[in-house]
Amino acid sequence: LYVGDVTSNATHTGDVTGATALTIKTDVALAGNPTTTTQTATDNSTRIATTAHVKAATSRLAPFKIDTTATGAKKLYYPVPFACTITGWELVADASGSVVIDIWKDVYANFPPTVADTITGSAKPTISSATKAQSTTLTGWTTSLAAGDYLEVNVDSVTTITNVTLTLTVTRT
């Protein structure tokens, strides 16, 4: 706050009637441990983003590009880059058809993941007679992923589709 020739670090929340030469600085450098309100996860404005906002923002893990010409494990290992919770999935295919995908997860020490490490429960990512599908229904899923976990995809069944891309939607934790 600048009033006349006096500079103050005080916060003023009241009426400034009668103040002379009131100047609001626009190039303020924040020091120490400043805090502010947390914006909503969907706010993409130029407001200051707190750590809580960034963690709450939904992101996507790098997509798995899967050759579905045969069923089985694809030996496509994906290291999870940050701790997160899976909130949904999306599949897009090169042709109309059907495919069921299983996802296996394991820690680095137990690499590689196997069918015993499935995380998808009863609601596996599935396309049925279409070119795309998505869902946030994760019934029976293990949704928690730790930084450094490894994921692998398994094609349980496929008809007509030869390539499919799986993307997991996550929230950082």
Image (cartoon, rainbow, N blue to C red):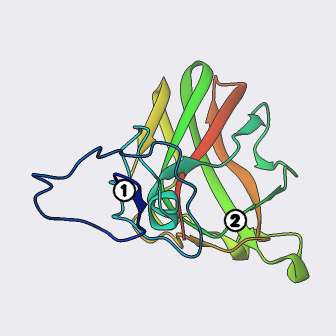
Task: Report which residue position mark 2 lands on.
Answer: 82
In front of the other: 148 or 119: 148
**Nearer to us: label 2 or label 1:** 2
- Outermost residue on the top side: it is 95
Does residue 37 lie above or below 134 as drawn? below
**Residue drawn 24% across the image and 65% down it:** 12
Query: Left or right: 61 with respect to 81?
Result: left
Q: How crowded is mark 1: few (under 14 residues within 10 Å), some or many (20 or more)?
A: few
Coordinates of residue 60 in the picture (x, y in percent): 59, 46
Mark pair 2, 1: CA separation: 22 Å
Kind of residue sitting beneath label 2: Phe
Coordinates of residue 112 in the picture (x, y in percent): 88, 69
Which element type, helix, strand or loop, lies under badge 1?
loop
User: On the rendered image, what quadrant is the C terminus found in?
Assistant: bottom right
User: On the rendered image, what quadrant is the N terminus found in?
Assistant: bottom left
Kind of residue sitting beneath label 1: Thr
**Residue drawn 23% across the image and 47% down it:** 20
Q: How crowded is mark 2: few (under 14 residues within 10 Å), some or many (20 or more)?
A: some
Which element type, helix, strand or loop, lies under badge 2?
loop
Q: Which of marks 2 and 1 is nearer the N terminus?
A: 2
Does residue 10 lie above or below 22 as drawn? below
Task: Report which residue position mark 1 lands on.
Answer: 137
Coordinates of residue 146 in the picture (x, y in percent): 68, 74
**Residue drawn 33% across the image and 64% down it:** 37
